[in-house]
Image (cartoon, helix red, strand yellow):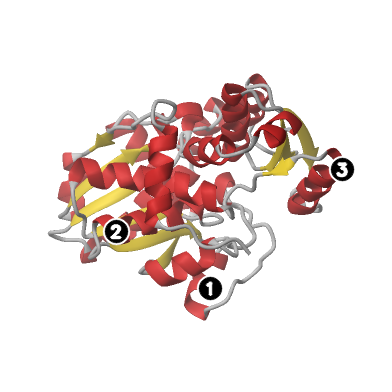
Amino acid sequence: MDSLPTFADVVAAAARIQGHANATPVMTSRTVNDALGAEVFFKCENLQRMGAFKFRGAFNALARLGPEQRRAGVVAFSSGNHAQAIALSARLLGIPATIVMPHDAPAIKVEATKGYGGRVVVYDRYAEDREKIGRDLAERDGLTLVPPFDHPDVIAGQGTAARELFGDVGPLDALFVPLGGGGLLAGSALAARALSPACRVYGVEPAAGDDGQRSFRGGSIVHIETPKTIADGAQTQHLGNLTFPIIRRDVTDVLTATDAQLVEAMRFLATRMKLVVEPTGCLGFAGACGMKGELAGRRVGVLLSGGNVDLARFCGLLG
């Protein structure tokens, strides 16, 4: 197993992606502050290149590949955002990329992945094992496999978003982070422990897929069937061998949010803050809203992780 990444790796990743990743804005809402009785800072990774935080980890991982690995190419598996991130990063770095994507991935994510030059291989997320497909392709074609979350360079890259947030607004009392496989949460926790040690870090995952919460509270990785939730970016079946120990060590708790709560969060962000955020990207905000009574008088960070959602589906969900 790879050794666990550290905050020093996050700092190195920040230098590596500088000039390539966007330093995304931090937004506030007086309405949210009044509702929670707190000072809330939204880190808008929905405005990142390719529309999600995933670009950070993907570019950092690919930038570290050697000449032979770059020539041979990479393979990744993803429901959409990591796919786009790998495809775009690979194009920028001149690396061939093959992406394993579920047949029901949002059309906007599939089209963007192809548009960035990625070769898409489709599979059934409810009947096939994407990790096995990725490993088989890597072995058959001599490709380097870059998983969506359980990779030290990916984790370090994702941690740069929280590092930027702390750099912009200073120490926080609480930080809410969407949770799928744990790359963003693990990286954010590394940044929080280094830059704001008293900050309570919360992962928030779909209620239909509470493997992270069960793993965190039970002390070992729990595997589940693919959850049915509108948060397609968090339809993971388990945490990673690298992400879990960091989360277990540095995170305060793992919370859940229902699809209905995600829709409510999407609606508020769209109507009041003029932000298009995909369901998965709203997990942190929904988690913060669910802790309303405990956040009074606190400085709170919320990571909005992505904004890649089909317009028709977005309008349909908001009704």
- Tell me which corner region of the image, top left, top right, bottom left or bottom right, holds residue 268: top left
Mark 1–mark 2 Cα distance, whole angstroms, equals 26 Å
- At label 3, which amino acid type do we have? Arg
Q: In this view, does 107 lie to the left or right of 204?
A: right
| Few, some or many residues within 10 Å of mark 2 (<14, 14–19, 20+) | few
Under mark 2, the amino acid is Ala
* Residue 164 image position (x, y, % from top left): 30, 41
Mark 1 residue element: helix
- Residue ID for mark 1: 214
Judge whether 283 appears above or below 86 on screen: below
**Residue plotted at (62% across, 71% down):** 222
Residue positioned most to the left: 297
- Per the rendering, the mark at residue 239 is none
Q: Dot 3: within a 10 Å radius of its alpha carbon, few (fewer than 14), some, or many (20 or more) residues?
A: few
At 59% from the left and 37% from the top, the residue drawn is 62
Number of the label disc, if any, that sits on residue 140: 3
Instruction: Say whether marks 1 and 2 touch (CB < 8 Å).
Output: no
Residue 182 in view (yes/no)? yes
Report the front residue among 247 and 191. Answer: 191
Q: Label 3 to label 1, Cα distance in Å?
A: 36 Å
Amino acid carrying mark 1 in the image: Arg
| Of labels 1 and 2, the one closer to you | 2
Q: What element carries label 3?
A: helix
Q: Is mark 2 on a helix, strand or loop?
A: helix
- Tell me which label, 3 or 1, sits earlier in the chain: 3
> Residue 219 or 31: which is nearer the viewer?
219
> Pointer 2: what residue?
194
Quadrant in the picture for residue 71: top right
Looking at the image, is mark 3 or mark 1 nearer the viewer? 3
Q: Outermost residue, bottom direction?
A: 218
